Amino acid sequence: MENTQWLEPLHPFTALKNLYLTRSLAERVCGALQEVSGERATEVLPALRNLFVRGSSLQPGQEAMTPFVTARQLSGFPVVFDRWKG
């Protein structure tokens, strides 16, 4: 799948505030979100506040998420990217 295709299943979840992803799924979704910047960053999961990834480390997902997290911060809709210990 192309990176942008990973975003299509997320579009219906406009009210989603917390997203929990496994490591393997996070790599694909984070890669897709990395390509979303500027004004488009608030179009995908507009209510999202927290993005959690299962695992002991956030690398490399954290680096992939930086453009998305920065764009959301600048638009006034910040997202926290953190580890899910569950």
Image (cartoon, rainbow, N blue to C red):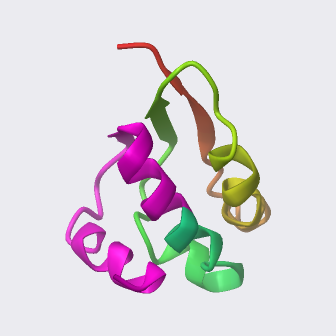
Q: Which residues are magenta?
A: 1-30
Image point (47%, 34%), residue name: 52
Image point (49%, 41%), residue name: 51
Q: Position of residue 63 (x, y in %)?
A: 76, 52
Q: Is residue 26 magenta?
A: yes
In the picture, which quadrant includes the C terminus?
A: top left
- In the depicted structure, whether residue 47 falls above or below residue 2: above
Image point (51%, 73%), residue name: 32
| Quarter where residue 64 is shown | bottom right
Q: Position of residue 78 (x, y in %)?
A: 65, 50
- In the depicted structure, whether residue 5 falls above or below residue 55: below
Q: Is residue 26 left or right of residue 36?
A: left
Q: Is residue 69 visible?
A: no
Q: Position of residue 85 (x, y in %)?
A: 44, 13
Q: Position of residue 29 (x, y in %)?
A: 44, 62
| Quarter where residue 74 is shown | bottom right
* Viewer-proximal residue among 33 and 75: 33
Q: Is residue 48 left or right of residue 7?
A: right
Q: Is residue 10 magenta?
A: yes
